[in-house]
């Protein structure tokens, strides 16, 4: 595969490899080690999807916990004001 862009603006193999490398660096403590070929890229993409799903679950859990906390607090308390301030930022 050529490492140059075609006139249609397709992404080159070098650019794909660079994007794959950047994606890999965003995954925490990934068991994925840079390899070569389609299987390695497929594994990285599956790990990325799995990580994104786990982040969604974590956000949902934290939202539920925050809702529970806010429902038990006096809405005029200093603690409630701190939480509102954090959420605005």
Image (cartoon, helix red, strand yellow):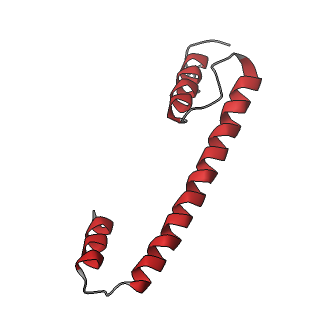
Residue located farthest toward the top when viewing the structure as drawn = 2
Q: Nearer the viewer, residue 24 or 29?
A: 29
Which residue is rendered at x = 29% and y = 68% of the image? 88
Q: Nearer the viewer, residue 28 or 37?
A: 28
Q: Position of residue 26 (x, y in %)?
A: 50, 35
- One can see residue 9 in this view: no
Q: In which quarter of the view is residue 16 placed?
A: top right
Residue located farthest toward the right when viewing the structure as drawn = 39
Q: Is residue 59 left or right of residue 37?
A: left
Which residue is rendered at x = 68% and y = 13% of the image? 1
**How many numbered circles does the render carry?**
0
Q: Is residue 54 left or right of residue 84?
A: right
- One can see residue 69 in this view: yes
Q: Nearer the viewer, residue 32 or 65?
A: 65
Q: Position of residue 69 (x, y in %)?
A: 43, 77
Measured along the vertical axis of the image, is residue 4 above or below residue 62?
A: above
Q: Nearer the viewer, residue 20 or 33?
A: 33
Q: Position of residue 86 (x, y in %)?
A: 29, 65
Residue located farthest toward the left when viewing the structure as drawn = 78
Q: Is residue 29 left or right of residue 40?
A: left
Measured along the vertical axis of the image, is residue 60 above or below residue 68?
A: above
Measured along the vertical axis of the image, is residue 37 above or below residue 9?
A: above
Which residue is rendered at x = 54% and y = 36% of the image? 28
Q: Position of residue 78 (x, y in %)?
A: 22, 78
Q: In which quarter of the view is residue 57 placed?
A: bottom right
Q: Is residue 18 left or right of residue 70?
A: right
Q: Quadrant of the C terminus?
A: bottom left
């Amino acid at each position: 595969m050529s490492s140059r862009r075609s006139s249609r603006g397709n992404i080159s193999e070098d650019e794909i490899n660079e994007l794959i490398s950047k994606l890999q660096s965003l995954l925490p403590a990934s068991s994925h080690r840079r390899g070569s070929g389609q299987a390695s890229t497929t594994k990285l993409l599956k790990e990325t999807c799995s990580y994104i799903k786990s982040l969604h679950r974590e956000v949902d859990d934290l939202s539920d916990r925050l809702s529970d906390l806010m429902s038990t607090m006096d809405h005029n308390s200093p603690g409630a004001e701190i939480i509102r301030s954090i959420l605005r930022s």
